[in-house]
Structures are given as C-alpha cells and as structure tokens.
Amino acid sequence: MEHVLRPIARMHSDFSGKFGIPRQAGIVPELEGLVVFEPEYRIPEALRGIEGFSHLWLIWQFSENLREDWSPTVRPPRLGGNERMGVFATRSPFRPNSLGLSCVKLLGVEEKPGMGLALKVGGADLMDGTPIFDIKPYLPYADCKEEATGGFAPDAGNTLKVAYAPGVAEKLPENKLEALTGALANDPRPRYQQDPQRLYAMDFGGFTLRFTVEGERLTVREAEPMAPGDEKK
C-alpha cells in the first residue's frame, strides 16, 4: 500500500527564494529559522523530551523543484556544472521524490502566538515555507562517522571575503547581518558564473540585496526593503 506523505510542519526562514540558500545545512550556523507545526500536529506531547537533543534531522521537500520526470544523472554545482554524476551520488534537488535531508541545531522550543510550540533551529538550509515531513533526533553515537569520506565534495569549498558599500550595512537589521554575511561568504552564485561585472540579486530577511563578485571579494552594492507582497509566503 502506498502512503501519501503530508507535511507536519513548515520552515519559517529569511530566504524567500532559492538563490543564496547555503548548499548544505550547518555551513552557516548563524542562520536561524523556525519550524512551525501544522495545526493537527501542534500537540505538546509530540515534542516531549526533544530538548535533550542538541541537533535534529529534518526530512523535507524541494517544493520549488517538483517535476514528474527525473534524470539518473545531474550536474553538481561543485563540479562547475560541467560533469555529470549519478543522482544518488549527489544532493541535487532534482530527485525522483524531491526529498531533502538536513541536520540542524536545536536552539530552543518556543511558544508562538497562533502557532503553538515551535522549534527554533540554527544552520538550516531551507527556504521560507518549505514543507517538512518528519523530524528525528540526531544521535552522535550512530550518526557521526569519523572515518567518513566526502567523494567529489570533500569540504565546504572556498569562502569569499564579504564587504558592504558605504551605507549599505546600516540599512540592514543588526541581528541578521552576521547570518547574511555568512550566507554570502559561501558564494551563492552558480559555479559556472564568474563575471565580475554582473550584478546579482538575492532576497533575505525582507530585503533585496544586489552584489558583485570580483576574485575572492563579494561586495554588497545595494540593499532595499522588499515591497509588500514580494516575499514568498
């Protein structure tokens, strides 16, 4: 018998679009998000004991990459989009079932008006509104493999030095600046784009940012509040 998956929760994050989201969870620990349960799962007993775990596994859906067909090979960004690898040897969003898996840090369990108990998490790589199908505790004795190897993606890759044009940083919420800088430092561009004249746009925390990248330096040129209704709900 086939089972239909139903979201138990949704992610609330500062990323209203896909562009700029870290390629893996935990790379930018300063990023904070809120896991808000769907009404039928807002049962306090379902979270009993969760505070004892430092990290959680989130099983979720690449809701912006749904498609009926799939390919056995994909072009990983880590390889510049120039080489194909088997889809099951990658974390590509273009998968048969469009499922994602992320390990996040549990920062706390909070009571939110109209939302019930919600999970505050750190290091999440999920877009705002992402449906979450399940939550499981991370177990260090079982999940941490010191001898593990990373294949063609052995590390997080190079980071960029982030700078802000005069007056830009002052426009942004101070409590989000560190997380934003961390996300930008991990180079949100597709690996095959290296044009220093190109002006990239990225939405974060209610702002649209525009930046350029020259060599190893990323400079945020503009930061403007997003118009009402522009943020993806």
Image (cartoon, rainbow, N blue to C red):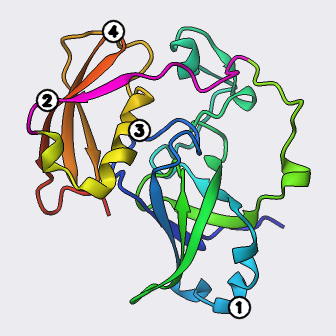
How far separated are the C-alphas under marks 2 and 3? 17 Å
- Which numbered circle lies on residue 183? 3
Q: Position of residue 56 (x, y in %)?
A: 69, 61
Which mark is first along the chain, 4 or 3?
Answer: 3
| Residue positioned 34% across, 10% down in the render | 194
Q: Which residues are magenta?
A: 152-167
- Which numbered circle lies on residue 45? 1
Viewer-nearest of labels 2 and 3? 2
Which mark is first along the chain, 3 or 1?
Answer: 1
Quickly name the residue at label 2: 165
Quickly name the residue at label 4: 215
How far separated are the C-alphas under marks 1 and 3? 35 Å
Which mark is first along the chain, 1 or 2?
Answer: 1
> Is residue 229 toward the left or the right of residue 25 in the image?
left
Secondary structure character of the magenta stretch overall? loop
Residues at discs 1 and 3 in contact (Cβ within 8 Å) = no
Q: Position of residue 98 (x, y in %)?
A: 61, 46
**Label 4 amino acid?**
Gly
The quarter of the displayed image where residue 82 is located: top right
Viewer-nearest of labels 2 and 1? 2
Residues at discs 2 and 3 in contact (Cβ within 8 Å) = no
Residues at discs 4 and 2 in contact (Cβ within 8 Å) = no
Question: Looking at the image, is 49 positioned above or below residue 172?
Answer: below
Question: Looking at the image, is 205 positioned above or below residue 135?
Answer: above
How far separated are the C-alphas under marks 2 and 1? 49 Å
> Is residue 164 toward the left or the right of residue 177 in the image?
left
How far separated are the C-alphas under marks 3 and 4? 17 Å
